[in-house]
Structure formats: structure tokens, C-alpha cells
């Protein structure tokens, strides 16, 4: 039997020249040829016989007569006249061929499929190709329908191939990560490999956990909670916590274009292959980024749509105290301290896997752990006026209330000695040691101050050791202490003196944020900023004593101005004051008080006779009432009110040497809606996600118009969540959660605020917050 004549690549190019085939068409043919050969080869390797070379050459020549009418017939005739019968057959069929089932597929089917995935000279997948065709021109309805049918047919053929080769066809053509990273602004955000990154063998793990921070790398890597949980979880030999951050828009665009799913930094594994996918909830405006990351990970957004094969999706962090706006998206929330709870949740998942339990059975089991909230075990019913009526258990074994997990002693859990050193410059790039958790001051606006109670200190010895180890293991030249109020550490003077000495000897700079500005702190600050005085910050929060008493700030006018005097005397020339506007009971007089503080500070400098420039910045943020604070019942100022307040503030500023900055009112309204939202918010978040919202905490990415339209057209009046004053007996959407402090205490504090009465710092005597009902309060506490 004589061998059939085979067309060669050389001959193809001769024919292109002879037929004057345009370069653009040749480039298209080259890409279709590449794609067709890869698919044919993948099929061959998986038991479906294909003549890969025939596919490759036929695809290369398929549009040789593209500029002529009925080019497939003209091209086939040309090939036949030269004796290339098999190639001619394939070329002739490529425009009209109906794809066969894979069991009967031939080389023609592969060329047809490849041709339907390439747009111009790039692989774009079936969707990309057909979207291009459908938008290329206005087609008749009938033609459009034919194209849609052809697209569906092509997709189903592709699915058959994918079932056979065990991977998506798109993934055969994904560029390598290296190729993608060559095209983005900061590739180091996505490569991992930093000093102190943990390397484990994923194959040997019981549970693999993708820990997601819903913001960019440099923001997430500044977050101490990530380093703590990374360290504590990876100390378990059978668990592997890998990090994931939101891609920046340039990277996201490439990932979507090339169908690259969200991956972890440690092993570059697709998140959907992990057992558990967990988010930290740091601020409300990151919620749409969470949905975007879930979509990029190809994980269904709604928990009810996820199957047994999908990762378990969990969340924790400060905003988890009101998990309700995200209830439909997560399988479980962890409320409270995570150091022991997170490994327990992950280990329980490993056990459940070994025992062959379903997800639901696992959730039933793990819901018994203190701090675990499984939202699907409850239904929420509403009154006709939209307020919550009650929570109804859908599984009778679910707890009545979810108590937060509290670590009674910080010294019993490890703290990172080898934190990861970020490659991209992070917001905070330094060694950090948490000195204590919790706060006793009782500021009525502060969610952290209420929900992190009770105060628990690390021992001085542990703090010293951690500082030394971190500096040694990271090479950082800055050390910072972390807590809600640095100088409230019980032996702050001793600790600060010792660390100052240690750092000076090693040429390490010491940073002590959130200092109470008394004379000792000034001496410390003066010492550590001896050569270069950075700006000094104060946080009076409100402009008048009356309002500072309402919010229980515990700072007097005298405290502020004597601190300014000392600062001026010691040589500081730049000061920043933090305030809030929109606080409960606030009047224009309180706002003018902010300008008055700036004016007096400048006057103190003038009177001091010191020389040089002196600058004061007043940074004013819009107050957003938060759950589990005494102001959780208070109305939030509307956008219009906030804008008016900003005008009053601008007029109140003393002019030269004083600068005013304030926050965007539209962002604060969105934050307010999400902070005190309920389960009905998931529909709003889905719409925000569909409209492209993500990275909204960034001024440049905040989708102002989208949010405005969504809120205004939402079936619920968004002001119900923001501007409404709640009564003390209203059931709050977050009332299923028990944060430790009692509701009675919060009500008491809210009533005292209305009367302008203060409550003492409970270091000087317990004020009955109730957290000692749940755990031992080191400060004593009283039993009610
Ligand atoms: S129980 Fe008393 S001492 Fe302890 S944190 Fe609460 S108010 Fe303060």
C-alpha cells in the first residue's frame, strides 16, 4: 500500500507565499496549529488516538485561502491538486463540521475546536472566541442564535475532552507564573520565598489551609495576627498554613484572562485544592474583596452551593464579632482569640476527613467548640418593621449563644520568634512584640477596647526574649511594641527603660505607638527620638471636654496642653491630633473645639519663644458605631451631615501652620451599613461583587458610584442600618454572639454617655463589664 503524501511545514509556508496569505492570517494559523497540536497530544497521552502531526499541519494551512470567498473550499481544492488528500479533507470541513462525540472524534474535530478557541493570534478559550464573534458586529437574531448553539456544542465537546485528560483545556495554555509576573508592577507580591517562610511537604499534611488576607500583600504582611496564626498553626506538624493575598488589579486582569486560579504563596497551589480556605475579617470594606478572591479561587461564593469536594470556607478576626452580613458565604466563623481555636478547628477537620464524615457532620461536631459559629444552623426571623425578631435553631444541637474563645494566659501560647520578612516593602516592616491584649480604659466608641477584654499581659521576660529572637532572626533594625495602649503595661517604665538600653546598644530604633503622654513617656520618646524627632501624635478624639466625657476618653484639656508644652520644650515641631466627627450628641461647638485645640497648640509654640516652623495636623475620621460598644444603638451621621460637619471644621481651623484632613463620607456610610448589618446584606454584597467592587478600602479603588447606586436602589432603605436610633430592647443581628462584656454593662455605659458621665479606667477598680463571668479577669472584676 502506498503511503499517502504528507504536507510539510516548509511546503505550507511556500503555499502562503504563493497565495499571498496575509501575515495576520498566517499568525492566526500558527496559533491554531499550536493549540490543536497540544490538545491532540494530550488526548494521545490519555488513550485517544490522534495523528498529532496531521492535526498540526492541517491547522497550519487551514486558512491559506482566507482572503477568498468560500476559502475552505478554495484551500481544499489547492491541497488536492497537490496530492494532499487528508489535509484537504480537514481544511474543507473546518467551517461547517459538526463536532462528533469524543469517542468518534477525528483530527478534523480537533482543528475545529482549536479554531474556536483562538481570537486573532491568541488562545482565548471558547468564551473569549465566541464573545469576540458575538460583539464583532450586530448579527441577525437567527445568526446570533446559531453562534450561541455552536458555542454550547463546542463547550460540551471540550468538557468531554477535559473529563478524559483530567484537566481543563484552558489550563493546557495557561502561561507560566513567571511569564505572568513579567507583566505586573510588583511581581514580588506573588512569589513567596521570604526569609522565615515555612516549607513543608504538602503530601504529608493532614490539613492544608489557605489563610487569606483580603487586601494586597504589603497590607496583609503588616498585620501581626497573620504572623501569629502562621507561626502557631505551622508548629503543628500535620497542618500547613499557606498565605494568599488579593492580587492587585494588574495581576487580577492577567489571572482572569489566562484562567489562572488564585494560588497560595508557599506552594503556588490553587486554593480550590486546599482543605480549608479562611479569611481574616479586619475591616468591613474588605468584604467585597473576599467575594472576589473566592471567585478567583473558583470556589462557589454561597456556602449552600459548595459541595463536599470544595474547601471548607471559614473566617475570624475583629469583624467576626458581627458575622451576619457574611453569614451566607461562610461555613463557620471563629469568634475570639485564634491561637488555640484555629488549630483545633483544622485538626477536627482532619479527623472528620479520616473518619469519612460529611461536611455537615463535621460542622455539627466542631460547633461544640467555644468560639465556633455555624451560621447555617440558625435562621433569622424579622419583624414587619425590619428589625430582628428572633434566631431559630435549624439544628437542635446548635448552641444557644456563641461564646467567644478567650485565651486566659498569653504566656501559654507561642508568639512568632521567626516572623516572615516581607519582600515588598510592607506598611510596617519591623520586629513586633505584643505586650498585652485587651484594654481597661472603656472608650465608648472602641470595639477593640470592649471585645478584647480582659487585659492579659505577656511577662517581661517573654517580651524581652521575643524581641531579641525576632531581631536576630529577621535582621530588622526597628522594634515596636503592640497593644491597644502601650503605656498601660503594668511595668511599662521598667520594660521601656530596658528595651531602650538594649536597642541603643544594637543600633536598633524603638517605636512605641499609642503612648499616654505623661512625663515618663516624654522622657522615653525624647530618648528614642534623640537624633531625629518624627511627628508626635495625640488622640483627644473630641474637641471639647463635654464630648470627651460622653465618649469616656479620659483625657482632660490640661492633659492635652501640658503634653503640647512638654513636646515643644523638648523640640518637637510637628504634631498630629486624631479626632472623630459625627459622635453621639456632637454639636458645632464640639467641632469648633477641634480648631481651638490646634490654635492653642500653635499659641503654646509661639509663646515658648522657640524658633523654626511649627505644624499641627488635625486628622478627623467619621465616627461609625460598631457592634458590642455602648454606641451600638446610636444613629450614625448621614452623608449630608458629615459634609456639613466638614465645612464647620474647615472654618474652625486657625489657618497657617494647621492642616485639616478628613475622611470620605461615602466610605463611612458603606462601612456603617456593613458594620451593623444583618443577613440580608449578603444580597447587597453579591451585587457589589458583580458590579466589580474590590479593594474598596483603597481611596483609588473605592467604587463610589457603584455603591451609591446599590444603596439607593436596594430594596431595604440603607438608612435603617445607619441613621436609625435603636431601642435598648431591640434584638441586634449580632446578639447570637457573646463577646464577654455583658449587654447590661453596655446599656449602662450608653445611658451614662447620654448624661455626660464618665466611667473610670477599671485598673483603678472594677466597673462591672461582666467579662469575669466568662474567664478570670486579672484585675479582679466583680460578680454581678
Ligand atoms: S471585669 Fe472589671 S476589672 Fe475586669 S475588665 Fe471588666 S471592668 Fe475591668
Image: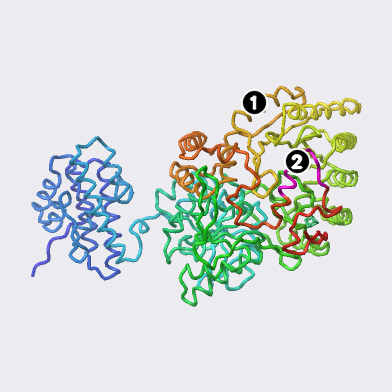
| Relative horizontal placement of residue 481, taking residue 244 as reference (left or right) | right
Res 196 → quadrant: bottom right
Please, what is the dominant secondary structure of the magenta stretch?
Answer: helix
Residue highlighted by disc 2: 753
Specify the label residue 166 is tagged with. none
Res 766 → quadrant: bottom right
Q: Is residue 679 visible?
A: yes
* Membership of 756 in magenta stretch: yes
Res 107 → quadrant: bottom left
**At which x and y percent is residue 252?**
47, 47
**At which x and y percent is residue 512?**
79, 49
Residue bounds of the magenta highlight: 746-759
Local secondary structure at mark 1 = helix
Estimate how packed mark 1 is, as few (under 14), some (14 to 19) or many (20 or more) residues with alpha carbons within 10 Å. few
* Membership of 298 in magenta stretch: no
Q: Quadrant of the C terminus?
A: bottom right
In which quadrant of this rendering is ligand 1 seen? bottom right
Could you say which is closer to the camera, residue 335 or residue 120?
335
Residue highlighted by disc 1: 644
Q: Is residue 479 visible?
A: no
For discs 1 and 2, the disc positioned in front in the rendered view: 2
Amino acid at each position: 500500500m502506498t503511503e499517502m503524501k504528507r504536507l510539510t511545514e516548509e511546503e505550507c509556508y511556500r503555499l502562503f507565499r504563493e497565495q499571498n496569505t496575509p501575515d495576520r492570517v498566517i499568525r492566526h494559523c500558527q496559533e491554531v496549529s499550536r493549540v490543536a497540536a497540544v490538545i491532540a497530544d494530550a488526548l494521545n497521552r490519555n488513550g485517544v488516538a490522534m495523528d498529532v502531526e496531521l492535526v498540526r499541519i492541517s491547522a497550519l494551512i487551514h486558512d491559506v485561502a482566507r482572503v477568498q470567498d468560500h476559502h475552505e473550499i478554495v484551500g481544499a481544492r489547492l491541497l488536492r491538486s497537490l496530492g494532499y488528500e487528508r489535509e484537504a479533507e480537514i481544511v474543507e470541513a473546518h467551517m461547517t463540521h459538526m463536532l462528533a462525540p469524543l469517542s468518534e472524534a477525528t483530527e478534523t474535530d480537533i482543528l475545529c475546536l482549536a479554531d474556536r478557541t483562538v481570537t486573532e493570534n491568541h488562545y482565548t478559550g471558547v468564551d473569549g472566541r465566541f464573545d469576540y464573534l458575538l460583539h464583532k458586529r450586530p448579527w441577525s437574531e437567527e445568526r446570533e442564535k446559531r453562534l450561541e448553539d455552536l458555542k454550547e456544542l463546542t463547550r460540551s465537546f471540550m468538557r468531554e475532552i477535559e473529563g478524559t485528560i483530567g484537566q481543563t483545556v484552558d489550563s493546557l495554555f495557561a502561561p507560566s507564573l513567571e511569564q505572568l509576573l513579567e507583566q505586573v508592577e510588583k511581581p514580588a507580591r506573588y512569589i513567596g520565598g521570604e526569609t522565615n517562610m515555612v516549607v513543608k511537604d504538602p503530601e504529608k499534611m493532614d490539613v492544608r489551609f489557605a489563610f487569606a488576607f483580603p487586601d494586597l500583600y504589603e497590607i496583609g504582611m503588616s498585620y501581626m495576627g497573620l504572623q501569629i496564626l502562621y507561626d502557631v498553626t505551622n508548629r503543628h506538624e500535620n497542618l500547613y498554613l499557606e498565605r494568599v493575598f488579593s492580587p492587585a488589579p494588574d495581576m487580577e486582569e492577567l489571572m482572569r484572562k489566562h484562567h489562572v486560579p488564585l494560588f497560595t504563596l508557599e506552594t503556588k497551589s490553587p486554593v480550590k485544592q486546599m482543605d480549608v480556605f479562611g479569611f481574616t475579617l479586619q475591616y468591613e470594606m474588605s468584604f467585597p474583596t473576599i467575594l472576589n478572591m473566592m471567585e478567583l479561587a473558583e470556589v462557589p461564593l454561597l456556602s449552600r452551593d459548595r459541595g463536599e469536594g470544595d474547601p471548607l470556607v471559614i473566617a475570624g478576626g475583629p469583624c467576626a464579632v458581627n458575622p451576619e452580613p457574611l453569614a451566607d458565604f461562610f461555613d463557620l466563623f471563629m469568634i475570639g482569640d485564634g491561637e488555640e481555636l484555629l488549630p483545633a478547628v483544622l485538626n477536627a477537620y482532619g479527623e472528620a476527613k479520616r473518619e469519612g464524615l460529611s461536611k455537615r457532620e463535621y460542622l455539627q461536631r466542631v460547633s461544640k467548640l467555644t468560639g465556633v459559629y455555624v451560621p447555617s444552623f440558625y435562621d433569622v426571623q424579622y419583624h414587619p418593621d425590619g428589625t430582628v425578631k428572633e434566631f431559630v435553631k435549624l439544628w437542635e444541637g446548635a448552641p444557644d449563644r456563641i461564646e467567644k474563645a478567650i485565651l486566659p494566659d498569653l504566656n501559654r501560647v507561642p508568639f512568632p520568634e521567626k516572623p516572615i520578612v516581607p519582600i515588598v516593602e510592607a506598611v510596617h516592616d519591623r520586629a513586633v512584640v505584643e505586650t498585652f491584649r485587651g484594654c481597661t480604659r472603656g472608650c465608648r466608641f472602641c470595639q477593640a477596647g470592649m471585645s478584647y477584654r480582659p487585659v492579659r499581659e505577656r511577662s517581661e521576660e517573654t517580651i524581652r526574649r521575643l524581641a531579641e529572637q525576632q531581631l536576630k532572626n529577621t535582621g530588622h533594625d526597628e522594634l515596636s511594641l503592640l497593644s491597644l495602649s502601650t503605656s498601660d503595661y503594668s511595668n511599662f517604665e521598667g520594660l521601656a527603660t530596658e528595651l531602650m538600653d538594649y536597642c541603643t546598644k544594637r543600633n536598633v530604633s524603638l517605636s512605641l505607638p499609642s503612648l499616654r503622654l505623661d512625663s515618663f513617656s516624654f522622657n522615653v520618646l525624647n530618648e528614642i527620638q534623640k537624633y531625629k524627632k518624627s511627628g508626635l501624635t495625640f488622640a483627644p478624639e473630641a474637641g471639647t471636654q463635654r464630648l470627651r466625657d460622653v465618649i469616656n476618653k479620659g483625657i482632660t484639656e490640661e492633659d492635652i496642653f501640658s503634653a503640647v508644652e512638654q513636646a515643644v520644650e523638648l523640640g518637637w515641631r510637628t504634631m498630629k491630633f486624631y479626632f472623630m466627627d459625627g459622635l453621639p450628641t456632637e454639636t458645632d461647638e464640639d467641632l469648633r473645639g477641634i480648631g481651638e485645640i490646634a490654635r492653642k497648640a500653635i499659641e503654646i509654640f509661639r509663646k515658648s519663644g522657640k524658633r523654626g516652623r511649627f505644624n499641627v495636623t488635625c486628622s478627623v475620621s467619621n465616627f461609625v458605631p460598631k457592634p458590642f460598644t455602648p454606641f451600638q444603638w446610636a444613629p450614625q451621621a448621614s452623608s449630608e451631615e458629615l459634609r456639613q460637619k466638614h465645612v464647620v471644621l474647615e472654618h474652625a481651623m486657625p489657618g497657617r501652620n494647621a492642616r485639616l484632613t478628613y475622611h470620605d463620607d461615602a466610605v463611612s456610610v458603606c462601612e456603617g451599613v456593613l458594620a451593623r448589618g444583618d443577613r440580608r446584606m449578603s444580597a447587597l454584597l453579591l451585587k457589589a461583587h458583580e458590579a466589580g467592587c474590590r479593594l474598596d478600602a483603597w481611596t483609588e479603588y473605592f467604587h463610589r458610584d457603584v455603591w451609591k447606586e446599590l444603596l439607593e436602589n436596594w430594596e431595604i432603605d440603607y438608612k435603617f442600618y445607619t441613621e436609625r436610633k435603636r431601642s435598648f430592647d431591640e434584638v441586634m443581628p449580632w446578639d447570637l454572639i457573646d463577646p464577654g462584656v455583658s449587654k447590661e454593662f453596655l446599656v449602662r455605659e450608653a445611658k451614662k454617655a447620654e448624661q455626660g458621665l464618665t466611667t473610670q479606667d477599671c485598673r483603678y477598680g472594677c466597673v462591672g463589664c461582666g467579662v469575669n463571668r466568662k474567664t478570670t479577669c486579672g484585675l479582679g472584676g466583680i460578680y454581678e
